Amino acid sequence: MSIIGNGKRYGEHKFPTEKDFEDDVVSSSKVLFGTSTIYINAKKKIESKSLGGTIPDAFFFDFSDPADTQFYIVEVELSRHRFFEHIFPQVTKFFAFFKNKKQQKALVDKLFAVIDTDNSLKGEFKKYLGQAEIYKFLSDIVDSSQNILLVADGVIAELPEIMDTYTDTWGKMVRYLEVKKYVNGGDTIYSITPDFETLQYTEIVGEPADEEVEEIERPKYSEEYHLDGVSAFSKEIYNRIKIIAFNVDKTLVFNPQKYYISIKANKNIAFIIIRNKKVRFIVMMPEEEIRRCIKRYPVASLSAPVQGFYNGPCASVDMSNLDGVDELPALIQRMIEYNQAH
């Protein structure tokens, strides 16, 4: 396969070994994932006992959304590897790690030691954290942002069925990125699917367009699915949103999907993403409209690719306390009015 770019034909580069692919991802991480990221090559930095006898390929921090920093355990795989003999057992080992507080603390200790003894790496973290303590940041992020990033050089055919079958592990925690490399002499082009900026919101077959697929074709997600394993505080915030929304308009529909719960009037007017310690309330109207209604919660701008994914102007109200819930009735009423007019 080849692609055309810059007036040249680029041929697909096939990685001869998994290590070649891993090394390429390490050296190109800022290109692949963006400049607001930190990619730590785990195999060179962390001994295997830190994760209960297994070691991933990398640890990855995504700071592109300052209000929603994400942490990933990274596994880089060649798509030609046998899924159930190689990829499935390797990724499955990481689920137990995220449930083991002792192993989590051991990893935080080791990561901190690595960062603290590497001035360049420490400087990268301080660029994003400012005066905040690196150790506390690591402890909080490993506890609250539990993602596994599977990077492959091609399609892994078994993944959609596995993610729909093991919804509480593969379905919730695994994010998949297909990276292909194309070369022409010394020039290189990468293709990345999906767009990395929308990774937290998309499943392999694609949402939200997939909401219209016949229900028999996909597992049924529920509120319980989204609330399982999150803090009591996040559950309380979600319940408050729901009560307030129904007080404004009893005809609103809360529609659980794989990575979010949408709120529908005549169409989707908001998306709720429930994290362990906060709730992201993504509102489908321009940011300036949202800011007119919301004064006591941070309103986070969303990138053009993310707004494109949601099919319209939007921004996120990040709720980690109950201080501003009395602002929600006016916001929800405005959401309904705006989307009826547009």
Image (spheres, rainbow, N blue to C red):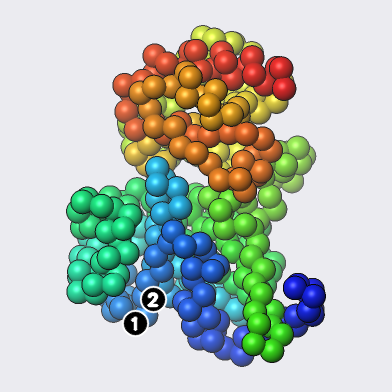
Q: Is residue 88 left or right of residue 297?
A: right
Q: Is residue 274 left or right of residue 201?
A: left
Question: Which residue is located at x 54 percent, y 86 percent?
Answer: 20
Depth check: 81 or 297 in front?
297
Q: Which amino acid does the dot numbered 1 rest on?
A: Lys
Indicate the secondary structure of the residue bearing disc 2. strand
Question: Which residue is located at x 72 percent, y 42 percent?
Answer: 209
Give how far apart the Cα atoms at labels 2 and 1 are: 6 Å
Q: Position of residue 217 (x, y in %)?
A: 74, 46
| Residue 202 vertical placement versus 122 (above, below) | above
Viewport quadrant of the N terminus: bottom right
Label 1 packing within 10 angstroms: few (<14), some (14-19), many (20+): few
Q: For the residues labelled 2 and 1, say whether their Cβ atoms are less than 8 Å apart.
A: yes
Label 2 packing within 10 angstroms: few (<14), some (14-19), many (20+): some
Q: Which amino acid does the dot numbered 2 rest on?
A: Asn
Depth check: 174 or 100 in front?
174
Question: Which residue is located at x 54 percent, y 69 percent?
Answer: 31
Circle 1 residue: 44
For the image, the number of numbered tags is 2
Q: Position of residue 254 (x, y in %)?
A: 59, 25
Q: Position of residue 329 (x, y in %)?
A: 48, 13
| Residue 277 vertical placement versus 153 (above, below) | above
Depth check: 252 or 120 in front?
120
Q: Position of residue 203 (x, y in %)?
A: 62, 52
Question: Which residue is located at x 39 percent, y 22 percent?
Answer: 295
| Residue 15 vertical placement versus 111 (above, below) | below
